[in-house]
Image (spheres, rainbow, N blue to C red):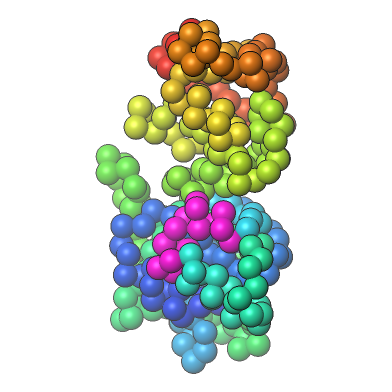
Amino acid sequence: MSVNLVIAVTDNNWFKYLSRRTSLTEVNFWTPSEKRFRALRPGELFLFKLHSPYNSIVGGGIFAHETLMPCSTAWDFFGEANGAASFHEMRAMIARYRKVDLEQQNDFQIGCRILTQPFFLPRDRWIQVPQSWSPNIMTYKRYSTEESEGLELWKKLSRELTIVHPDEKAPAERFGKPRIIRPRRGQGAFRSEVIDAYGRRCAVTRERTLPALDAAHIRPYKEGGEHEISNGLLLRRDIHSLFDRGYVTVTPDLRFEVSKKIREEFENGRHYYSLHGSKVHVPEKSLSVPEPEVLEWHNENCFLG
């Protein structure tokens, strides 16, 4: 099958900072502009090339998702996986590229390319870019394994690398023949994909103020739940807190239910009871809709009734 690869020009300091953090399971390759990124499908390869004079591929990752978000949200989701030690440092990098005064207090909207299973090559294993790469390229160039340069690049990567899964029970795998590689989402990728799948609106209240929304796991990760969109709900933060504590739930037929415990324990909850029995709004794509099995798990194991 044909697989695409992207070679993207990378900030040298971003690469240097992240290459020292070998435990990362995901990174945010952000851009200071608000341009969308449509060059890859989830599971294709996104590769890093340093700025001139370096003319080599120095690392990469499995492309998982692209989105736009305020830089403060990107920091909340990914922290140091944004390639900076602090939010202030990240904003300074964005402001420098945008050529604006850092004292401006605006929350820059940035493009995010979220990568899982990142890898960073030691200096002696850097890979030369294909001959067709031009010094005039400022952002990225796409290659296909249907073409000679793309196929040769894939073969070089296959010889150099293995994909090591965050789940230690899963074996490492070589790239082998060109194919889509299933991205293993981390917490940040999960949160960003759930937010976009739900159209950035709370599934219960339809609230759309982004800082007030959380991507909730239906079955918690520590309880065996996965970082899958079908194990997620986008909820207003107060409802997320109640959901995690079992004071509210969503039934397998996608109805919102409120426990009588709110009234008994807090002598309050009128706002939440007014939502009792309401239909929960879910993504249009069937693969993103909450799985009835995980909703039933929450009903039976978390909900206080």
| Residue drawn 51% across the image and 48% down it | 189
Q: Position of residue 93 (x, y in %)?
A: 54, 75
Using the image, determine if residue 183 lies above or below residue 91.
above
Nearest the viewer among 76 and 159 is 76
- Residue situated in front as seen by the camera: 35 or 136: 35
Whether residue 139 is visible, yes or no, is no
Please give left or right for residue 119 compared with residue 201 in the image: left
The spot of residue 43 in percent (x, y) is 53, 51
The front one of 184 and 18 is: 18
Determine whether, in the image, residue 134 is placed left or right of residue 208. left
The correct choice, above or below, for 56 with respect to 27 in the image is below
Which residue extends farthest front?
267
Q: Residue visible at 44% across and 47% down? A: 186
Across and down, in percent, residue 120 comes to 37, 69
Give percent across and percent down for residue 241: 49, 30
The magenta stretch is 71-86
Q: Is residue 265 magenta?
A: no
Evaluate whether residue 273 shows in this view. yes
**80 drawn magenta:** yes
33 or 288, which is in the foreground? 33
